[in-house]
Image (cartoon, coloured by chain):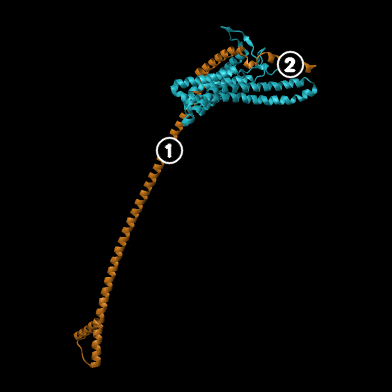
Amino acid sequence: MRLQESQTDIAEGAGYAAEAAFPPFDPTYFASQLFWLAISFAILYFLLSRWLLPRIGSAIEERKDRIADDLDAAAGLKLQADEAVKAYEKSLADARAKAQAVGAEARAEAERQSADEIARMEAELEGRQAEAEARITSARNAALAEVRNVAADVAGAVTEHLAGLTVKRDEAESAVDAVRSQEAAR
Amino acid sequence: MADTNPIKQFEIHPIAELSVGGLNLSFTNSSYFMVAAVALTVGLLALATSRATLVPGRAQSVAELLYEFVAGMIRSTAGNDGLRFFPFVFTLFIFILMGNMLGMLPYFPVPGLHGFTFTSHIIVTFALALAVMTVLVGFGIFKNGLKFFKIFVPSGVPIAILPFVIVIEIISFISRPVTLGVRLFANMLAGHILLKVFAGFIIMLGSVGALGAVGAIAPLIMVVALTALEFLVAFLQAYVFAVLTCIYLSDALHPGHH
């Protein structure tokens, strides 16, 4: 029963489609379609291009500007920070150089003082050495003079004892000198 | 008993009769949906941008997303100087998108009116396509003068085959508004017929009894799947129409570059 009903419905629909033109190609309302399409499209175009799109665009533009400004500000701050770091490093380097200069000066002063001290000590030691050498030389000369006397005495005593000759002191001494000079020459 | 005629949805009924100089300019259900599309677009965008803030809210984000979407589409197809057509392309895109989406409503909440898709009528889509071509030719000649006709003379083609190429280029140029209009029209028409045919199966099977009602589950699943597909098609066809418009308009800006 219900099936029959729906079949009649379909039949009616098909009949309608057959007798009237296929609606999308039916020219009855072409003029109306074009007319209202033109009106609605024109109004939409006008409202969008004059009002809404500039509004959306300006919001986007404003945001872009703001972001660009913020980025610029950040870049400026970074530059400042970089300069501060540079200044800090420079002062640090200056301080280090100054400390090194002070240290070098102190070291030079100390070296100069110690060199003075060493020179003074050396001079003193040399003086003492010269003095000691002079003393040694004089003692040696004295000892050598004593040797000559003893030799002359011994020569006199030996000659007297062996040859029974009394040798004068002068002769003995000259004989000793002659022998020594011969020895020295040889 | 519901009407299962899948063509009925495309019928136009006058709401207010209007005749000017013998022309039938009645305000119809189709006109109603056009005006509704305009009112909805303007209303929603106005609402979304009424309190423009630096950090956008949800509605403003969507409006800006749409804006950037269309602007990006123009930039990538016609270059930065294509942005002079931005309001036109945006209007086309949003108008077609709204028309397609409103067409997805099965019934519009107005007494005596069935759901209607004005983009499923070839006169509408063809008029939109012709508007694009008019802007293309008008602006192209206004900006480039006779150099505009270089679009029919591709660079780097040997003289011997140049006449053939020019003929082919002219034919392809003339076929542009036809394909542009027919593509949108045919997609919307076919999709909506398919939806209604499968919906009709549900009613027919449901009226045969218990077994038929169980069998009606299959077309029901099909209708749900097709509805999802039709939403995709509704967006995609608006997008395709706008992209092709951009590509054609880039010819008006740079004739002889293709």
Q: Say which colour chain A has.
A: orange
Q: Where does label 1 land, which residue?
A: A82
Is B73 located above or below residue A148 in the figure? above
Within 10 Å of disc 2 (Cα), the crowding (few <14, some 14-19, many 20+) is few
State which mark lies toward you, 2 or 1: 2
Towards the viewer: A50 or A117:
A50
Residue B20: x and y in percent read: 57, 7
The amino acid on which the numbered mark 2 sits, given as a three-letter code, is Ala
Q: Is residue A174 left or right of residue A15?
A: left
Within 10 Å of disc 1 (Cα), the crowding (few <14, some 14-19, many 20+) is few
Chain for numbered disc 1: A
- Figure chain in cyan: B
Q: Is residue B70 left or right of residue A123?
A: right
The mark total stands at 2
Q: Which mark, by number, is residue B99?
A: none
Q: Is residue B56 in view from this perspective? A: no
Q: Is residue A146 in view from this perspective? A: yes
